[in-house]
Amino acid sequence: MAKRKLNRRQQWRIKKIQDEKAERAKRRESQAEQAMDSGALGSEQTGLIIAHYGQQIDVQACDDQGSALTDSPLHRCHVRANIDALVTGDRVVWRAGDDQSGVIEARLDRSSLLQRPDNFGQLKPVAANIDRIVVVVAVEPEPHANLIDRYLVAAETLDIQPTLLLNKADLINDDNRAELETMLDTYRELGYEVLLTTARHTTDDNSPLLEWLSHHTSVFVGQSGVGKSSLIRSILGDDSIRVGELSENTRKGTHTTTTARLFHLPAGGQLVDSPGIREFGLWHISDAELLEGFIEFRPFIGHCRFRDCQHEAEPGCAIREAFESGQVSAQRMHSYERIRSTLDDKETY
């Protein structure tokens, strides 16, 4: 579809709005710099980024061990110009100001960073310092194995433990049960933990999920509409968390989470809710990383007849032979082939 052409007045209005936003951001930056110069800020301390809103970031104070003080208020902070891009889950050095404001002065080292391509083909950080990835799928919208596999490859590449969570399990019926079980059994057989739940459950009903999440920093990932925010609302008992309905026409999700946000769990641990997406590109990883990301391939890597084997139709390909003998499922082999064909494509994801 061709883009709608804007008339001169519309172009002027858009530029005016953008200039006003830039001016407001400049004023906030100037005010923060003045506060620092005047000594109006407190002493340096460690903080945890709870959410990121463009130029403004919510920070919560941490104790001497670097753990968030969950009862302390959030401070909406300005970021010093010389700091690299920040993301939810980052630990930072910051100084508190008046009226729950503050300034971030430095970012501390990360233990991990989950990234995904944005609409411009650039890598966009999703969450930092996470040690577990929960791939959330649902009965509706229909789950797609290829998207699940992309998340699992990302988790394996980062050496972060993943699990698969099927939400809206109350919608399983005689029409979809066999197909869902076949797909889920593929991952169970590979050793991945598979949990079933529904956002209608109470905190007690979600105890297996809470037990898996407790004492870890986890991130919910998945396409729009699978119920990530609804699950968090159910777990926390917080009705203020926005949730969205599926489109009546497409039965696909609508975006309700627009920025990653970190929540403290009642049983301990932290959970990041990330914006839903329809695709998850992996063009930033290498062929070797992709092979390692499919854990069932690992025993056969390096055993092909030819060193430069492309694992397509070459004679003596150990990966193809494993597939043909049933040691690799058709579902996973097709996912690998599809992902590999797009490694060099910086398309919109």
Image (tube, rainbow, N blue to C red):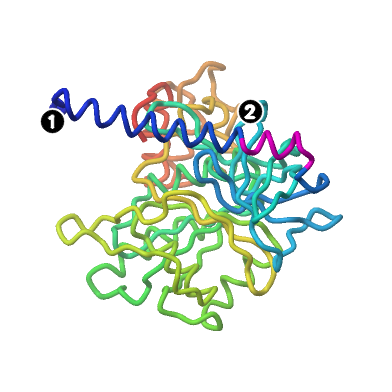
Q: Examine the rendered structure and indicate whether residue 13 appears above or below residue 232.
A: above
Left or right relative to 40: residue 211:
left
In the image, what residue type sits under mark 2?
Answer: Ala
Q: Examine the rendered structure and indicate whether residue 255 appears above or below residue 234.
A: above
Q: Which of 191 and 254 is in front in this view?
A: 254
Please name the predominant secondary structure of the magenta segment in the image. Answer: helix
Q: Distance between the residues labelled 2 and 1?
A: 39 Å
Q: Which residue is drawn at 53% across and 28% down?
A: 285
Picture quadrant where residue 120 is located: top left
Residue 197 appears at what percent x and percent y? 45, 73
Picture quadrant where residue 100 is located: bottom right
Q: Quadrant of the C terminus?
A: top left
Picture quadrant where residue 334 is located: top left
Residue 173 appears at what percent x and percent y? 27, 75
Q: Which residue is drawn at 67% across and 62% down?
A: 73
Residue carrying label 1:
1
Secondary structure under tag 1 reads loop
Q: Which residue is drawn at 56% across and 51% down?
A: 51
In the image, what residue type sits under mark 1?
Answer: Met
Residue 282 appears at what percent x and percent y? 46, 33
Q: Nearer the viewer, residue 225 or 161?
A: 225
Give the residues drawn in magenta, as a range: 31-39
Residue carrying label 2:
81
Q: Which residue is drawn at 43% across and 50% down?
A: 275
Q: Name the N-terminal-most of marks 2 and 1.
A: 1
Q: How crowded is mark 2: few (under 14 residues within 10 Å), some or many (20 or more)?
A: few
Report if residue 211 lies within the magenta region.
no
Left or right relative to 37: residue 196:
left
Left or right relative to 336: residue 250:
left
Q: Nearer the viewer, residue 206 or 301?
A: 206
Residue extending farthest right: 64
